[in-house]
Amino acid sequence: MAKTVDQPSWVKEFRKAVKASTPKGWLVMQGKKESTRVQIRKDAKKIADITIPYAWKESDWPDALLRIRSAAKAYQESNQRLDIKTCFNIAHKVSSKTEINWEETIEAYREFKKDRVKDSTWRSKYHPVFKNVIIATRNSSKASLNGPALCKVALKQWQQGTPIRRHMRLALFGFLRFCVQEQQFESTWLPPAVTDKDLVTTKKRIGYPLTDSQILRLLDSFPVDEIGNKWRFAFQCIAVYGLRPEDLRTIHTRNSGQEIWTNYEKSRGGKKGEKTEARRLYPLLVHDIDGPINWHLKEQLALCEKEGLNLLPPLGKEGNAGDACRTYLSRRKVWEAIRKEVSRENQELTAYSFRHRYAYCGHNRPKADGSYRAPKQIADAMGHTLNTHLLSYSRFQTKDLASAFDETSLLVKTA
């Protein structure tokens, strides 16, 4: 009795796809010397046996399927009068001359993802890399471009190992798989395999906490006009309340102006799908040489709410407040001067450096009674889980470490 050999899963998928997209009686099988045979039967009789130049292997069957579908379409549109071989010749000419409309394909992918991807997510984590796809496909010859080459060009602007590159890579790879599996692109447009280089690095950036004097220098450099005053208020709030830029969008007062809150929702960094809730904000005032400065931020906000005025600058579309803050800061000469100071310490100055300052003061500035705040209190005030907070700010917790070692000159005897 002949031994049955199990077929690879891709062969089953290939034959199933051919059956679903061709008339009854179209069969595929392995050919000779790196080819695929297409056999067509009608009324139990073989009417054609065609060999097409695609290897009988997993990497080639999507392209073979595209050629077979095109030939079957030509055969049906002729009311089965055309010779099968002629239909395959027509399919070859069509597939070799077809130009891809990338804009329409991207629109089709947006429609495909509409129930799973919010507009704000599409703008921030899909659109930037698709913009690069359109530019790359316009500037490169069709013959020189394929899936891996397109990915290399479209992802070039984002650094390897960063979260933003990971978001763009996932969006692009998913799109290219959609092109091949749903839009019948040739398999050469499939993305490359993910390598270790694509993994997000676990090394945390050393975010620099701005000092109070640096904040005051920066705020003093803002122009004294309507827009300058609005940005001044925004960064005062970020510094004093430890806000994320997006928090600015939803800050408001409660209890007759006695409390200030934010409604911004963000992933808590814990269980998947868990987000931050609305939270009350608590100040850590900026100090000058004479002590704490009260900018009366809460009172200003309450008054403007009562009068229907807007104290905040334009922050762009949802999810883009960080970009708006970075853009404004990058235009300030004092900000660039501070950046150079920070780079000499091998740290990084960002729009989040105001928030880092809040965390630093929360851990290191003693309360009125001389005691220090619990890490959980600071995490709650900043809208973090404790684990997420410690991951980012554990370096701010150790106080008076130098005095525990031979740092103080009084402890060192003269040799």
Image (cartoon, rainbow, N blue to C red):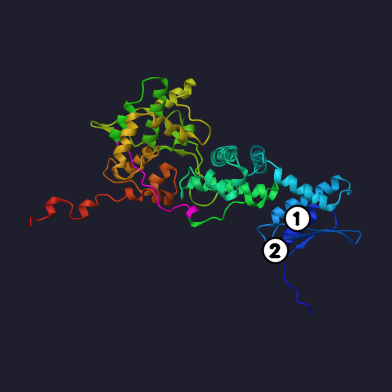
x and y percentages locating residue 172 in the rendered image: 58, 46
Q: Is 3 on the left-hand or right-hand side of 159?
A: right
Residue 110 at x, y = what percent? 64, 40
Residue pointed to by mark 2: 9
Which of the 4 image quadrants contains residue 342?
Answer: top left
Q: Quadrant of residue 211?
A: top left
Which structural element holds mark 1?
A: helix
Chief secondary structure of the magenta portion: loop
Query: What is the x, y in percent for residue 79?
Result: 89, 46
Question: Eyeballing the image, is 67 above or below 135?
Answer: below
Q: CA distance from mark 1 to mark 2?
A: 12 Å
Q: Amino acid at mark 2?
A: Ser
* Magenta span of residues: 197-211
Residue furthest to the right: 43
Q: Does residue 201 appear left or right of residue 108 in this picture? A: left
Q: Residues within 10 Å of mark 1 (few under 14, many from 20)?
A: some
Q: Report the side of 39 relative to 389 (left or right).
A: right
Identify the image quadrant of residue 258.
top left
Q: Which mark is residue 17?
A: 1
| 345, 68: nearer the viewer | 68
* Disc 2 packing (10 Å; few <14; some 14–19; many ≥20): few
Q: Position of residue 377 (x, y in %)?
A: 39, 46
Is 260 situated above or below 42? above
| Foreground pick, 177 / 87 | 87
Q: Secondary structure at mark 2?
A: helix
Was residue 391 drawn as part of the magenta stretch in this picture?
no
The quarter in which the C terminus is drawn is: bottom left
